Image: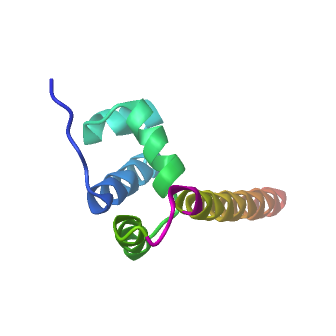
């Protein structure tokens, strides 16, 4: 089986499909199987594109192609976006847990 290259747009679209499937109760393994990629690819994509919007990913790829952005700087940018996303998700989870606790007490 040959390798298939996905564009940044396709990756982000598939990444969002996995998020929707997870929200509906599917495991990551089930969700990535639905979109037709391996878990390894999904985790690699999440590391590189997690939390990015489509326009951000396009701009990042354009800068990489033009060699205006070194790989180290691009990786740093991706890491910063991932950290911000992780922090935001953690804060939302904390808020959700507090709200659930509040609802259960009523």
Instruction: Give 61 or 51, whichever is nearer the viewer.
Output: 61
Taking the view exactly as shown, the residue that stands out farthest to the left is 1
Q: Residue at x 72, y 57 (%)?
A: 90
Q: Residue at x 39, y 74 (%)?
A: 59
Q: In the rendered view, would you say 31 is above or below 45?
A: above
Quadrant of residue 85 in the image? bottom right
**Measured from the top left, where is residue 32 in percent x and y?**
35, 37
**Measured from the top left, where is residue 54 in percent x and y?**
37, 70
Q: Quadrant of the C terminus?
A: bottom right
Quadrant of residue 66 in the image? bottom left
In the rendered view, does 97 fall on the left or right side of 85? right
Instruction: Give 32 or 58, whichever is nearer the viewer.
Output: 58
Taking the view exactly as shown, the residue that stands out farthest to the front is 67
Colour scheme used in the picture? rainbow
Q: Quadrant of the N terminus?
A: top left
**Measured from the top left, where is residue 4 in percent x and y?**
20, 39
User: Is residue 70 among the parts visible in the rendering?
Assistant: yes
Q: Residue at x 33, y 54 (%)?
A: 11
User: Is residue 27 among the parts visible in the rendering?
Assistant: no
Q: Residue at x 21, y 33 (%)?
A: 3
In the rendered view, does 32 fall on the left or right side of 2? right
Whether residue 41 is in magenta: the answer is: no
Quadrant of residue 82 in the image? bottom right
**Measured from the top left, where is residue 68 in percent x and y?**
45, 72
Start-end of magenta stretch: 68-73
């Amino acid at each position: 089986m040959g390798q298939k290259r996905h564009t940044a747009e396709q990756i982000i679209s598939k990444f969002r499909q996995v998020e929707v499937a997870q929200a509906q109760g599917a495991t990551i393994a089930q969700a990535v199987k639905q979109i037709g990629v391996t878990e390894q690819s999904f985790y690699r994509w999440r590391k590189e594109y997690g939390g990015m919007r489509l326009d951000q990913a396009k701009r990042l790829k354009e800068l990489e192609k033009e060699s205006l952005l070194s790989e180290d700087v691009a990786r740093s940018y991706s890491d910063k976006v991932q950290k911000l996303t992780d922090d935001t998700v953690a804060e939302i989870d904390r808020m959700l847990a507090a709200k659930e606790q509040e609802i259960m007490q009523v």
